[in-house]
Amino acid sequence: MPSRCGTAVSPPSRLLWPHRGDPADVDIVLIDKGAPPGLFEGMTRLRVLIFLGAGIDGLRLAELPAGVGVARLATRELASEVVQYLLLRVLYRQRHAAEYAAHQQRREWRPIAPAKTPETSIVVLGAGRIGGWVAKLFAELGYRTAVWSRSLKQIDNIESFQGPSGLKAALAERDYVICALPLTGETRGILNADSFAAMKRGAFLINAGRGAHLDERALIQAIDDGQLSGACLDVCAVEPLPMSSALWTHPGVTITPHVASYWVDSGIEQAADVCRQVRSGVEIKNLVDLNRGY
């Protein structure tokens, strides 16, 4: 829900949408979802839009007045939560947590050998704050780890692939494919039938990026054909996931409701700091590169 703080009056006023007062007074907008139609009309003094989340793909940037900067939350705490989630999903599967839960219900004592870590290969799509961090942790744990991103990365003990020409090689022979990409024009629909065909047969997909990265029909087909062994999706093309979606009941799919990162408390101080920067007239930090989309 949009809200704002600004410098047009003293002390600064704060308004909650849809009560926005005189739009010409607004110099900062804080928003946690896509902007309501017409939100920016008359905001001639608007300097920055603060998005209370990690990705700005839900914003209609074309509606922003020229020269307005966009800041997003990018705290270590939020990144840590996503990294924890990605580690959990791999370890949950590798260490047979679901099977042991079922065995307990049947009172069965049945040890299962996990896949050997040095023989388990992981590729992380995206090598930024989140992807780079989780790749390093997987490498430290002994997994054969690679990253794929728009530019080549130099990370110890991690193989790096770059650009569209390097995607198929990055995907090949990986037991786990993890998507931690921002959503841009280049990455939209990147997890599709061609990508699945390039993966190792039996690979497992984890998507904690954006729902629009994934062709959901192609995913179901790939699992049904045995090309993929399954998938864990924290994000979906439509959220909440419609009751009619086949993903809900597919035995090879695990759904979590966009909770890889949950608490935004750690970002509130960051948002407040941007407000202070605007009020003091200094350079605004943590602005998104609107050409790249992140």
Image (tube, grey):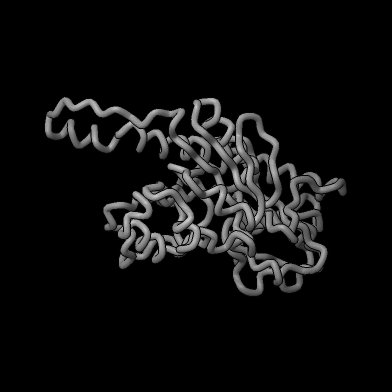
Q: In this view, does 8 lie to the left or right of 99?
A: right
Asked which quadrant contains residue 50, the reply is bottom right
Q: Which of 52 and 228 is in front in this view?
A: 228
- Residue 259: x and y in percent read 45, 46
- Residue 138: x and y in percent read 52, 32
Q: Which of 108 and 53 is in front in this view?
A: 108
- Give me the residue at 62% from left, 35% from top: 76
- Give me the residue at 45% from left, 47% from top: 206
- Residue 42: x and y in percent read 76, 72
- Residue 260: x and y in percent read 48, 44
Q: Is residue 147 left or right of residue 292?
A: left
Q: In the rendered view of the protein, which quadrant contains the N terminus?
A: bottom right
Q: Nearer the viewer, residue 169 or 85?
A: 169
- Give me the residue at 45% from left, 57% from top: 196
Q: Which of 33 and 45 is in front in this view?
A: 33
Asked which quadrant contains residue 77, the reply is top right
Compared to 84, does 152 lie above or below?
below
Q: How many labels does the image show?
A: 0
- Give me the residue at 70% from left, 45% from top: 152
Asked which quadrant contains residue 266, the reply is top right
Compared to 178, does 219 lie above or below?
below
